[in-house]
Amino acid sequence: MLSARLRHPLAALAAAALLTAPWMVVHFTGGPDAYGLGHVATVGVSGVAVLGAAFLLAWAAETAEKDVPRSFAIAVLAVLAVAPEYAVDALYAWTAGANVGTPRGIEAANLAVANMTGANRILIGLGWSGIALFTVYRAHTSGDPAVELDGVLRSRVNLDPAIATEITFLLAATAYAFLVPLGNGIGLLDTVVLVGLFAAYIAIIIRGEVSHDADHGGVPAYLQRLRRPARVTAIIALFAYSGFAIYTAVHPFAHGLEEIGQAAGIPAFFMIQWVAPLASESPELIVVVYLVNKARSTAGFNALISSKLNQWTLLIGTLAVVYSIASGSVGTLPFDEKQAAEIWITAAQSLFAIAVLSNFDIAVWEGITLLTLFLTQVFVEFGIIRLVAEPRSTELSILVLYAYTAVYLALAAVLLYRRRESVVHLVRRTLRDARVAFS
């Protein structure tokens, strides 16, 4: 009897909520300083809260599929999961706007761009590639129908063709991103274009069909059996609570990791570009791993691609708005040559990743290529930062970024040419879905 109760969906809900409880108590009673928590303890308590909140967020999104189109539910999940990343970038953009023309303002503006590009490259370099490799690995025991096992390197994860809309809009945002460094910074024109793309995307997917035959188990299945008023209330409560828990816990989690890293001799700028975004992306990655473990890899990749799209549109687009509000006038968030190179390599990586997904699958060799390019670039740049003094260090870093940008672009060009028919089909399907949505 006790064993059956422990397996009840409400027991799982309670367990996930309990993981967040210690942090919520700390947060509402003075924060880590009030309890004398060091950086390691803060990372532990807030990290466990992020884990519990990620499960609650995933269950809310799965439950919501009964009432709203699946793509829209996943888009909401993606926005909430990466909300902490928005907050971190907004903080730097606000600081830059409040200190226009000063060394502090210039540094904050560059940090906003560095944090944004780091988060976007992590999402593809570690997220897309790592989840693809993990999905193939899990398919040997999970029997995931989306995975084709065909040798070590040729095994692949098949994606849902319905995600054509996300990939096409991501392609449009990526094409525009190449133009951003050509201006004096990130301005309101960029906001209009990029936020406009995201708004058009949401307008299309929210009109999609609702799937009533989703095969769920556990907590989502239990909640979906509730009457509609109770179910909707549960969904809203889970989204609100998990989003709040993630939002409040990720910042101390990331800050604690930064302090631990700096104590180990890792440069602060490097920590802000790579470690802080990795921490803020953790809820999203946890959710996707959960979905893959349930043999729902297509939904997991949908979430990853949706996250990339909203970060590559909303995240960039809102920086100029925050900067302008803080400065008290319409302005352009400036950045230096190094950050311009960071935007170009991020756009090039995004283009290569889109080329990989253009035929609605990702093979093991493609995942390994994405992962290898990402890791080698980060490690090479880290080595330059540690071993070479300024200003030569920055000059070498920029050369490395341009070199990797060229590699990404060359690989993307080859794949897009070989898969040009798939790209045409991708765009045509998106246009068809848009016509259906607005008809």
Image (cartoon, helix red, strand yellow):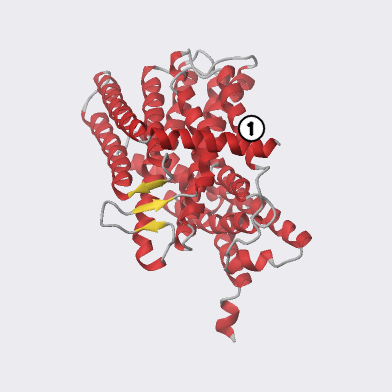
Camera-side residue of 22 and 423? 423
Where residue 83 sits, quadrant-wise, is top right
> Dividing the image into 4 quarters, which one contains the N terminus?
bottom right
Q: Residue furthest left?
A: 387
Relative horizontal placement of residue 258, taking residue 391 as reference (left or right):
right
Q: Position of residue 316 (x, y in %)?
A: 52, 28
Q: Which amino acid type corresponds to the residue marked 1 in the rendered image?
A: Ala
Per the image, label 1 sits on a secondary structure element best described as helix
* Count of numbered badges drawn on the protein: 1
Determine if residue 283 is in view: yes
Q: Position of residue 183 (x, y in %)?
A: 47, 13
| Residue drawn 61% across the image and 71% down it | 9
Q: Is residue 155 above or below residue 164?
A: below
Q: Is residue 296 above or below residue 376?
A: below
Determine if residue 85 is in view: no
Q: Position of residue 283 (x, y in %)?
A: 50, 50
The residue that mark 1 highlights is 199
